[in-house]
Amino acid sequence: MAMISGSVIGSGIFRKPSLMASQLGSPELLILVWVGAGILTLFGALTNAEIASMISATGGQYIFFQKIYGGFTAYLYGWAVFSVIQTGSIASIAYVFSDYSQYFWTLPRFAPEMEKAFVLHIPFIGAIFPLENIGVKLLTVTVICLLTGVNYLGVRFGGIVQGTFTTLKLLAMASLVAIAFTYSGGSVSHFVSSSTTATATSTSTIGLLFLVVTALAGAFWTYDGWNSITYIAGEIKDPNRTIPRALFIAMMIVITVYVSINLAYLYVLPVPAMAQSTLVAADVAKTVLGAAGGTFIAMAVMLSTFGTTNGTILASARVYYAMAHDKMFFKSSGAIHPTFHTPGNALIVQACWSSMLVLSGTFDTLTDMLIFVTWIFYAMGAYGVFVLRRTMPDVPRPYKVFGYPFVPAIFVLFASCYVVITLYNDVTAYMAGKTPIINSVFGLFLVATGLPLYYLFKRSAQK
């Protein structure tokens, strides 16, 4: 439960609500999206829990996809974890740490014309500006390297760091909610739309649907990370029973925490003010307690994201380690350090690629890219329950998904629609000149880079 909640509750809840408020323009829709995204994520977690109760091995969904769809799909998922999903998570979470550090000091950056002068054009994808916000990006790379070093030195050391920062994170959550609701200038009237804030409710039904789907991308990013426990299933006692129970209880806690925090934000700041805030948690605390409050929350955000980055680095390297043992990844990534007993090479490769992703884009680019790719595999993973019920009917299932077949079917249907609409939104925004890059296509491009390597790994494995 601690690992799941620690991996899920990270940077998103401190950053995404302001963007979602600007997209929706309605407090009711904002809360509805957070609740709906939480329920849909819970459906996915419960569906995944049935598979986890059947198959408990280090490597998580990489191993699941081997059993469900075969080696090629499993490889694509593993490569996606490396190229986009988990490395993108590491990059974006650490990016928030660095971004919030600007509350205390100014990080160097080039003049806007210099930032735009150095540009990389990728065909069919768009323009990338590596020098943009260069100070934030360099600090982000430093954090990634530092925490990779922590986990390189041993699981116990990494676990101590994780436990410490998870505790600090939960204290920060409780403090944020408490100080917000004690603010005399707050108002419950901010929970309902007014004539000046209800912009989303005035759109057409189709327009409203696209607004909600766009906002869901932010919420899903914030809820992401629930499946990280499956990566280390082979190292958990009684995983067939422990993982399903931990997933359910932890996700209920996370939903409660997220809704409470968003209500706290709204109590202090109406939707228009939230939409204009770039550091919403710090701005709420500053409004309530003055400069001291803003300082406290900014520090709490940095502690939280530091810990979440550590947890993601710790768990994710196990996937590449498992792939390397199947000879479907770089052979050196399957080595265990003789002294520290950690997958040291896998950690180093992960850190290098995460750093490259940091330089390639901003926080929102990274999160939109990885969420799109993640939900493709979430849909495939949930559909795997139907496949395994047919192909492995006699295998013991300590846990069976509640509401079968409706719960997994709802999740698969929604995930599929979400992926299609997100792709449409990204292409439309790019064609309209609203964004310099098609985030979803960029994510697919990074996954596709693994196709040539698949045949090389396959040929090498057969020798």
Image (spheres, rainbow, N blue to C red):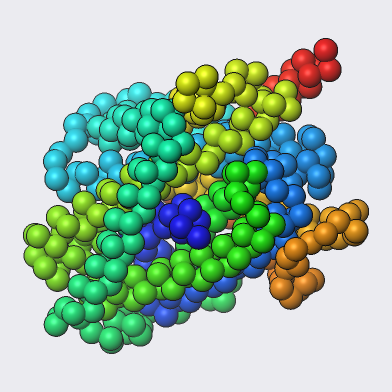
Percent position (x, y) of residue 346? 54, 26
Percent position (x, y) of residue 93? 39, 45
Left or right: 29 as drawn, with respect to 280 = right
Q: Is residue 25 visible?
A: no
Residue at figure coordinates x 82%, y 39% from the top left: 70
Q: Nearer the viewer, residue 325 or 227?
A: 325
Residue at figure coordinates x 70%, y 48% from the top left: 56
Q: Nearer the viewer, residue 298 or 113?
A: 298
137 over 45 or under it: above or below: above
Percent position (x, y) of residue 278? 27, 55
Q: Answer with the quarter of the image where residue 261 lies.
A: bottom left
120 over 160 or under it: above or below: above
Percent position (x, y) of residue 314? 48, 39
Residue at figure coordinates x 32%, y 49% from the top left: 164
Hey, which residue is sitting farthest top in the picture? 463
Residue at figure coordinates x 52%, y 27% from the top left: 341
Q: Nearer the viewer, residue 313 or 104?
A: 313
Hey, which residue is sitting farthest left in the picture? 291
195 over 410 or under it: above or below: below
Left or right: 100 as drawn, with respect to 366 = left
Left or right: 296 as drawn, with respect to 448 = left
Q: Is residue 165 visible?
A: yes
